[in-house]
Amino acid sequence: MSRPPYQTYPHHHPHHGRPYIEVNDHDILCGRGVNIASHPGNERFRALVQTRHDENYCTVYTTSEKRAVAEQILKHIQSLDPPGRFLKRIGRAPTSRGLQGPWEEPTDREAIKKTCQDISSMFTICS
């Protein structure tokens, strides 16, 4: 049974009051592991990062130019139907493994920072 994205966790849940977020295929999940890496949104994100990658990114681009590239990627993800979101897991409970939550949305600033980091790491992988 799928819950609508506007519901909150039940009273007995440790994250009571927080909105329940259901992951969609356009979401980018922050974290590690095979389940996270193979999520369709993460695969799409890596492909987008590769298309925006430029060997001058780390050495020539200014901070504002790097941010502009990251914002373009973020806007593209948010323009999908349904819109993609960056999601990070709340806490480190042993039950929060794989694609199970609970999830929360980081700020746009955090999402842009992650995108910039991923583009930079692409440079070190490709060189």
Image: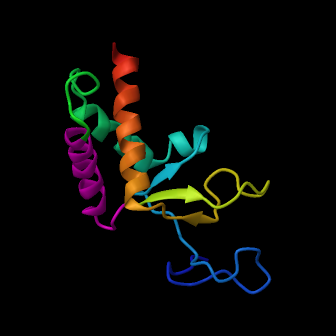
Q: Is residue 97 left or right of residue 110?
A: right
Q: Residue at x 51, y 81 (%)?
A: 4
Q: What is the magenta segment's predominant secondary structure?
A: helix
In this picture, is 3 found above or below 101? below
Task: Name the one closer to the observer, 86 or 37.
Answer: 86
Q: Residue at x 33, y 12 (%)?
A: 127
Foreground: 99 or 1?
A: 99
**Residue 13 sits in quarter:** bottom right
Reply above or below: 95 against 7: above
Q: Nearer the viewer, residue 35 or 56?
A: 56
State the image coordinates of residue 74 (x, y, percent, origin top left): 30, 54
Where does residue 112 sit, x and y in percent of width and height?
Answer: 36, 50
At horizontal 24% and vertical 63% (from top left) the residue drawn is 79
Residue 71 on the magenta segment? yes
Give the percent coordinates (x, y) of residue 56: 21, 22
Residue drawn at x 70%, y 52% as measured from the top left:
97
